[in-house]
Image: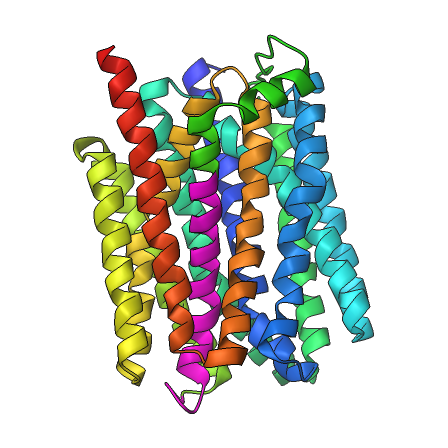
Amino acid sequence: MSSLAKRDSALVLLSLIFFIWGLITVVSNSLIPHYKAVFALDYKTAMLFPMAFFISRIAVSIPTSFVMAKIGYKATLQYCLFWCFSGCLVMAYLVQSEELLLTLVGIFIMASGISAIQVVSSPYVSLLASPEQSIRRQSIATASNSIGTVLGPIALSAVIIAASGMGYFKTAEQISILFLCISLFFLILIIYFRVIDLPDIQPNVRRGFWKGLGALIKQADFVKLALVLLLYIGVEVCFGTFTITYLADENYGDLGLVRATQIIAGYWALMFLGRLMFAKYGSRINSLRLFIIMCSVSIMICLLAILITDVFIGYVLICVGLCNSTLYPIIYARALSAAKQYSSQGAAILIMCSIGGALLPLAQATMVDLVGLRVSYWLPAISYLLMIGLFVQTATQVTAQTKT
């Protein structure tokens, strides 16, 4: 098999992995309002569910990166696929208990496999290409991720409707069926992995793993970009979660939970469309300028949500998906470049930044309980402002170093 064909097969596999983790992540986010109703929780306590999902990034990212540095990307990816397959089966079993604690344990075990496979696949996509093609291939993969995020709410609604038609009316039973289907998808990926001739990459670790990790943490540009990524993932989840609440709540959109869950697919659809456009035209656009514009538009939409209460604003909030679409590939590619030879350690830290997807929604949920949903949109507005400041700092420093 030619080198090009091998890399294309690898990109297909990795894009499918990006797809399924996008679907799982969005399904998990979309289930939060459902869990809130089932367990009769307030907004703050309901954030235990995304916390269980995203805390797995902290638990498994560094160990996975360490293993990857020792045995390479290919072998680690194979183990991670088996982990995801098993984790989805465990989730499907434990969620049927209808116990809050066991459900949280099931989410954590399932999400741990997703976290581990992200550590491997995210840098794998970039490293299989030349540096100038890295952002483009990362955009293709993240576009696949966006397809998963678009189909996530639709798949959830379809499972609820289909399961109800078959006599499964309990939310736990419906979620169990969903994760059984997802486990089957991972089984197919495992088979595909065994069929293709996947190129292997051994991380270029010039120093010991832990010493390299310490050296990377001392790199100011990388740390700032990692913080930008943490904030970005936080605001992405905030909009994906609380826009459902906005559209469903009788004081705002008053569309009902099932209808709002279906409509939120538009948020992820716009993100998918934006990433496709960025994959095609991104090389022609100044990434710094685009980053600032998209963050600024998102801030203005947040201000609209603060000032106006109407179902129309709920649809405007969905448009933030288009603004967010270009941010991840820009941030991730630049951060991985800043990591230089410590790509495996850098990938682990960047995946750990997904904890922002738990921290910022938790903070916004606390604000919702205290001051209301409308005022809580100050949090994402300020987060976007911080993202602009940090990203501009790193870009300015890179420009100064280049001139020197």
Image quadrant of residue 103?
bottom right
Q: Could you say where residue 58 lies in the image, as x and y percent from the top left?
A: 66, 43
The type of colouring in the image is rainbow
Look at the image and say whether residue 42 sits in the magenta stretch.
no
Please give the name of the residue rendered at 41% of the width and 87% of the height, measured from the top-left corner. Answer: 255
Whether 354 is drawn above or below 397: the answer is below
Q: Nearer the viewer, residue 231 or 15?
A: 231
Q: Is residue 321 left or right of residue 203?
A: left
Look at the image and say whether residue 249 sits in the magenta stretch.
yes
Residue 333: in sight, yes or no?
A: yes
Image quadrant of residue 382?
bottom left
Whether 241 is drawn above or below 171: the answer is above
Whether 252 is drawn above or below 112: the answer is below
Q: Could you say where residue 379 lies in the image, as x and y percent from the top left?
A: 42, 63
How many numbered marks appear? 0
Residue 139: in sight, yes or no?
A: no
Q: Nearer the viewer, residue 33 or 145?
A: 33
Position of the C terminus, as image quadrant, is top left
Magenta region, residue range:
227-254
